Amino acid sequence: MIAMRLVTALFAAFVALPLAWLVYAAFIPAEALVRANLATFGFSLENFAALRGTGLWRSMAVSFSATSLAVAGQLAFGLGAAYAIRNGLRLLALVMLLLALPSELLLVPLYRQLQNLALIDTLGALVVPFLASPLIVFLLLQGLRRVPWEVIEAARLDGAGEVAIVGRIVAPILRPELTASAVLAFAAHWNLVLYPRIMTTEALWTVQAFLTELLRARPFEWGLLGAAALVASVPLIVLYIIFEKRIIEVFESGFRS
Amino acid sequence: MNRSLTAIAAALLLSAAGAQTTITFWHSMEGVEDTVVELVEAYHAAQSDVRVDVRYVGSYAEAQTRLVAAFGTGNEPVVFQAEIGFFPRLVGDGALQDLADLAATLPDEVVADFYPGLWGYGEFGDARYGLPWNASTPVMYYNADALRQAGIAPPTTWAEFASAAAALTTRASQGAMFVGDSWLFEMMVLSRGGVLALPDGTPNLDGPEAIAALTMLRELARARQLAFYGAAESTPAILSFVRTRNLMTFASIANWPDVRRFSIGFELAAAPVPLEDGGRVPLGGAQLVVMRGASEAQRLAAFDFWRFLVEPENLASWIEASYYIPVRRSAIPLLDDFYAADPNRAAALAQLELAVPRPRIPEFNAWRRLIDDALERTLRGNQTPQAALAEAQRRALEER
Amino acid sequence: MIRGVRARAYLLALPATLVFAVFSLVPLLSVLRYATWRWSGTTDPVPVGTANLLRLLSDDELWAALGTTVSFALLALPAFLTLSVVIALAIEGLRYERAVKALLFAPGLITVGGSAIAWYLLYNPDFGLIPEVTGLVLPWTSQPWAALVYIVLFTLWQQTGYGVLVASAALRGIPREVKEAARVDGAHEGEVRRLIVLPMLAPTMLFLTIIGTVFSLQSYTAVYLLTRGGPFGSTRVLGYYLYETAFERYELGYGAAITLFVLVITLVVAYLQARLLARRGASEAST
């Protein structure tokens, strides 16, 4: 056990180190990094101030709207699909196939698809292809196993429509799974890099596209980059803190032996 | 002759009819996008027949990906800024429109005003596929304080460079630094009078000048007088330079503003690269091209836009913002104050007459990667220059 | 009546199926088509039939990339699984269990570009902060083995958080009575762990292995950000080779063939592992 605790401590330190560095770089004066001595300790908020006017906030607004819409879709459509599968629809093989698809090469045909639908360079390009996710369907399917089927049968006998059943009975029971899926889906969409840069131009860049550009345009300004990276990560961190309990719960309930 | 008459007639018709042509222009000029927008707005103010929809589409690499994705979808741009490594491929693929007839309408004085290497770059036999606008050459950046203190003049030949690197090396800093970029290596070969591709298009990656250049780099690296960084590591490389971990290096003149901004601890200077007899320097930058899918009206409009961009006054404003080199001689007097304010900015000018295009062979793009590999193997690994370059040459021949 | 209900239930899958069909399946069919072309993307494609597929067989770089990927997976997956279990066991029930889990999960939340910068500045052999301060150097810019280790370390840094969360949750699910019974019978902690806990964790570990395998076979973000396939191509994994072929060499037709190659391998491996998982019977994560 001591050995295991030691391993844990070492690994935790290993994980913390780059995070600490980012925070450190964000809070020291910008030019400290260019001077020869990296161990200066001045505290400064100038990096964060410098973020104003760079377009970071705009890109965060874009990311926020696009990701929220995408996640809403993934949850709603994913729940519908999972429910259908639970009712016997043979869709699971397709879902597994999609899980295995390497997405990068789909970039070129996907561009054409979006072009045909006149979605290039619109918010739609960031939302519509992501309205459903195989992983979310999978997760919600796991969650559905918890739902006592008698309740659904009873509701059907009472004459409730399927949509009503899903919305009023299943969804509330699955709240932990939905919450956890929402956080994971949010993080996955928020962190997309290559895709937004190709499908949209500057006005509609997401946070990641913006950060990539910042990295190219001002490559030496690590303080600024660190501050930008932190700010861009804040929504995810906040979401995680709020919903951490739920996420743990979901993983637990999903893996009862 | 008929074609040019048709062109002029069409242009007249267009302007007479008041029809406005809109052309999309995709560029990769990060950092100076505002200047590009200003130029476009000035163009709009100067005439009303053409509207330019200007878009910054990311780095050269991303612009290429975007272009590929857009191909055949009707979303392609009319005018595209093709990096000179990508340009020959576009030509080879037949993706560009011939502009020779339009170029022929230019007055002789205008054509003569362009530097020959820059003007000739877009020509392929009788056809013209590219127009010059942003060009650069590599220059030598150095720490003027350090050289002064060591009593060394900026080297003008490679022998001087090697001994300067040795003399400047101390425990705290290395005399020189080199980023393993094939363009910079090409510079080292060309400046010794060699070439990386023969006129008939065959590769020449293991010629004597290439071996000499790589051998010099290797010896300096082994003696710890030169720091080597891989092609993808240019950012930390430049950073090590501004932190005075090394004192001489090579980069594009267009990098001057960035490097200058961070060289706060010392006086930064730029000079022409060391040259041997018969030496040349490679051009960098891009060509403005018109994509195949553009209409005739758009083709004419694109040419008109380019003419505006290379008016001497517009070129001068462009250069003051971007630090690219003037593609026309008549822009230089307009830049007197600019260069006088900081003579380092003019470091590339002296090399202009010696500037030559990079080999305009579609496969050259692939050879660049082979050169990067050879540099890495020799300067980070253990291969000898001869073996590494012979390997690169072998693979280049295979891929043809 | 039952039929009608079923049909209406199935209808609820329509939106998701539409999205999948339009934005995943149709592009996949396009990719199948591209695989029969030689195409640079900037001009019309040239149909070449099965030439690309045949080229797959004789392409040394492809098989080298597969080898690299397998080496990567063999290094990363066991480490990932072991670390997940060990850490989950070590922190179970402790006061700072939640804090540790949150910390380990954080790299997944930090934007990936920022992570790359931080890693570069910390671990670069020539000027990174760690070599400067401690003298410990991993020569990943010049030694192939070190570069692979570097990529593995970055991947572990990013992904172990998930593994710990999953393992920890699975641990919670082991009924206390079973462990108590063993203790009453005289087993000490080590034996309880070895003979009771670990076997009951096995289905979860298999599940993680499947997800981890798919990820290892396809992912190349770490390579793209940190080593670009170098040095000397020693970290060129399958995913990165695909990216290079399609987006740096502009061989979209051949790139499509490679995509199919990767897809087939992924499906085969995932299928085999899923069968194993199903056969084990237990746990909810079955096909």
Image (spheres, rainbow, N blue to C red):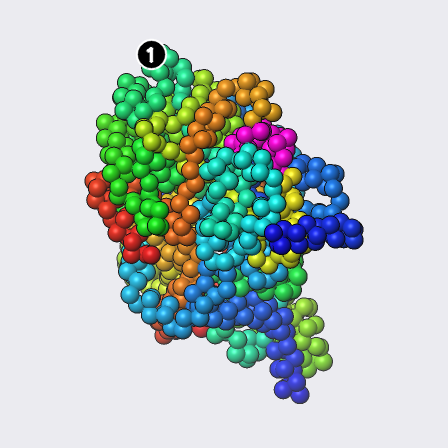
Say which quadrant the C terminus of chain A sits in: bottom left
**Vertical relation: C261 (above or below) B305:** below
The answer to whether A182 is drawn above or below residue C50 in the figure is above
| The one of A198 and C85 positioned closer to us in this rendering | A198
**Circle 1 is placed at which residue position?**
B151
Residue at (62% x, 54% y) in the render: B3
Asked if residue B375 can be seen in this view, the reply is yes
- Coordinates of residue B118 in the picture (x, y in percent): 49, 38
Residue drawn at x 46%, y 38% as measured from the top left: B117
Give the residues drawn in magenta, as a range. Answer: B309-331
Mark 1 residue crowding within 10 angstroms, few (<14) / some (14–19) / many (20+): few
Determine whether the residue tagged by mark 1 lies in a helix, strand or loop: loop
Q: In this view, does A144 lie above or below C68?
A: below
For residue A215, side relative to residue B6 (left or right):
left
Magenta run includes residue B176: no
**Letter of the chain that mark 1 sits on in the rendering:** B
User: Label 1 sits on what residue type?
Assistant: Gly
Asked if one can make out residue C77 in the rendered structure from this viewpoint, the answer is no
Instruction: Choose between C287 and B194: the one closer to the eye.
Output: B194
